[in-house]
Image (cartoon, rainbow, N blue to C red):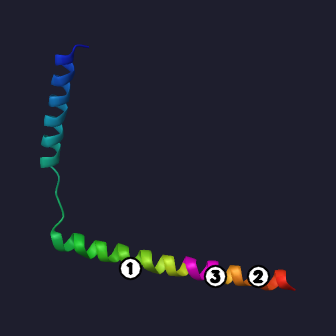
Amino acid sequence: MKRNETINLMINFLNEVKVELEKVTWPKRNVVINYLGLVITISLVVAIFVGGVDFGLTKGLEYFLKK
């Protein structure tokens, strides 16, 4: 493939991407903020849960190994 053909293909691809992105229904700002808050909250809850389980298992293993 020649260099000009490659450049034309890239330009064509980018134009098609632009056309497709114009068809997208983007969410409103407040919806994105609400979902972000939900994701952060769930992530924190899961992190605390996993950390608690890890801590408990570590202490339990230390208890049984000391006996």
Where residue 13 sits: x, y (%)? 19, 32
Secondary structure category for the residue under label 3: helix
In terms of sequence position, does the residue under pointer 1 or pointer 3 come before the other?
Answer: 1
Up-down relation of residue 29 to residue 53 (above or below): above
Nearer mark to the viewer, of 2 and 1: 2
Q: Is residue 2 magenta?
A: no
Question: Which residue is disc 2 drawn over?
Answer: 62
**CA–CA distance in space, label 3 to label 2:** 11 Å
Amino acid type of the residue that numbered disc 1 sits on in the rendered structure: Thr
Instruction: Please tell me the numbered disc located at residue 55.
Output: 3
User: To which residue does mark 1 refer?
Assistant: 41
For the stretch drawn in magenta, the main secondary structure is helix
The residue stretch that appears in magenta: 50-54
Where residue 67 appears, x then y in whole percent? 87, 86
Image: 39 above or below 13:
below
The residue tagged with tag 1: helix, strand or loop?
helix
Say which amino acid is labelled 3.
Phe
